[in-house]
Image: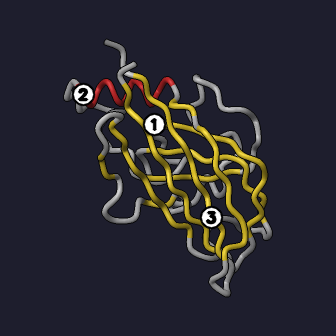
Amino acid sequence: MILELTGQIHLEVIGPDGQLKDTRDTQNLVVDAGREHFAARMQRTIVPPHVAIMEYIAVGTSGTAAAAGNTTLVAEALPAAIGARAIMVAPYPTVGGVPPVQILYRSIFVAGTIAVAWPISLQEAGIFNEVSAIVGGEMLARGTFTAVPVDVGDTLTVDWVINVNAP
């Protein structure tokens, strides 16, 4: 039996007044490194780089299509900043569904934390097992979407579902 890993991303931009400004929904690609991480964790292989769990979401500005060989975002927003990747909101990640089994992720980028220059136009997102690009780590999945503008006072919520199917 072969496991199929697929997923969807939902983004919401909330303005400083608490009103919904924009949304995006798109499919993602579980990349080769993410599949390897998944398999290693299933085998209880807890050696670098498979030690850390996938618990961070990063966003970026490139609309370059996701590819199986991706290991980073093409243009991660604030790649050198510790904490630029948003850690999952408790109780995420969670697991549910039968079948398919779903792994649910949620991160919230509070106002003013995504960029240095505003506004920023986001077009990509990824799930990682490390807090920043300078630390490294592995990418589980990457998705691209039509540009979503985010301003300094906006909050961005990223909900991500990874489906584990047995076709």
Which residue position holds label 1?
Answer: 138
For residue 12, which numbered disc appears in the image?
3
Q: Which residue sits at x=48%, y=61%? A: 107
- Classify residue 16 as left or right of residue 102: right
- Mark 2 surroundings within 10 Å by alpha-carbon count, few (fewer than 14), some (14 through 19), many (20 or more): few
Of circles 3 and 2, the one toward us is 3
Q: Alpha-carbon distance for marks 2 and 1?
A: 16 Å
Which residue position holds label 2?
Answer: 42
- Single out the residue that lies furthest toward the top: 1
Q: Which residue sits at x=78%, y=53%? A: 147
SS under mark 1: loop
Please identify the quarter of the rendering in which residue 40 is found: top left
Pointers 3 and 2 in contact (C-beta within 8 Å):
no
Q: Alpha-carbon distance for marks 1 and 3?
A: 25 Å
SS under mark 2: helix
Q: Position of residue 94 (x, y in %)?
A: 31, 52
- Identify residue type, mark 3: Glu
Of circles 1 and 3, the one toward us is 3
Q: Is residue 139 above or below residue 160?
A: above
- Mark 3 surroundings within 10 Å by alpha-carbon count, few (fewer than 14), some (14 through 19), many (20 or more): many
For residue 68, which numbered disc appears in the image?
none
- Mark 1 surroundings within 10 Å by alpha-carbon count, few (fewer than 14), some (14 through 19), many (20 or more): many
Q: Is residue 8 above or below residue 150?
A: above
- Say whether disc 1 or disc 3 marks the residue closer to the N-terminus: 3
Quarter of the image where the N terminus is located: top left
Quarter of the image where the C terminus is located: top left
- Identify residue type, mark 2: Met
Q: Which residue sits at x=64%, y=58%? A: 78
